[in-house]
Amino acid sequence: MHPKEYKEEKAATGRFTHLCLKNSEIYMGIDFDSHKAVQEQIHDMRYFPMLLYPGKDAINLSEGVVPSGFLHDRQLLVILLDATWRNAKKMFNRSLTLQKLPRIGIVPEDKSRYLIKRQPHDWCLSTIEAAHELMKALENAGLDIYAQPNQMLDLFDRMQQYQISCMREPTQQNYRRGVGGKIERRLISSK
């Protein structure tokens, strides 16, 4: 998790993702090359670490086809970068360890549902949406079980509805004052 997400975004989608995935952990930083806990997990031979990050060389799990010997008899360890797209790129570029990891890619079924923040491209998703798509792809590929497939997106929708209700209420303290009109236009255009 980028420090800005960790310190400033109290309702960040990365925190909600962590709450939905029982075997997940949050580590804060920008450069993870010297981050002790991250390095221990990446180098633990029980795990096959991969980074969920777009790129030509990423294995597209959305196709449901897993290459033979994919995990090398190890447990899959997926690393997600929780930050704005600009900051996620900085995290990736500053961490040689992350750059060297094999990558997982997904092709989302839908555009981002994020009404409060704009995504730079149609294929860009918030952390919780990316985790949802990843879990669907992992289950489809027979690598995991996604027991509650609506949990993350339902939580994401509730988070956004609460934030939108705060924006509409002039007496509420909120961190996005003044953007309510933009959100209203997005809500109308998304219907």
Image (cartoon, helix red, strand yellow):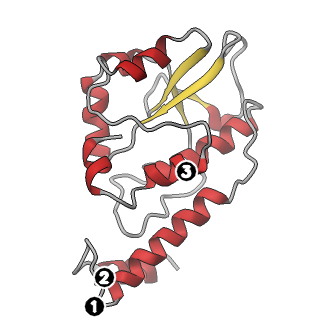
Q: Earlier in the sequence, mark 2 or mark 1?
A: 1
| Drawn side of residue 163 relative to residue 50, left or right | left
Q: Report the amino acid beneath label 3.
A: Leu
The kind of secondary structure element at disc 3 is helix
Residue drawn at point x = 67 percent, y = 39 percent: 137
Task: Give coordinates of residue 10: x percent, y percent.
Answer: 35, 59
Is any atom of residue 70 visible in this view?
Answer: yes
Helix, strand or loop at label 1? It is: loop
Q: Position of residue 22 (x, y in %)?
A: 62, 42
Work out whether 149 lies above or below 33: below
Foreground disc of the pair 3, 2: 3
Q: Which residue is mark 1?
A: 171
Point 42% across, 49% down: residue: 124
User: Could you tell me which residue is drawn at 53 percent across and 80 percent down?
Assistant: 191
Alpha-carbon span between mark 2 and mark 1:
14 Å
| CA gap, disc 3 and disc 2 | 28 Å
Q: Which mark is residue 180?
A: 2
Say above or below: 125 vs 34: below
Front residue of this view, candidates 145 and 103: 145
Q: For this view, does 63 lie left or right of residue 51?
A: right
The part of the image, by quadrant, that contains residue 85 is top left
Q: Which residue is mark 3?
A: 19
N-terminal of the two: label 1 or label 3? 3
Q: State whether residue 100 is above or below residue 168.
A: above
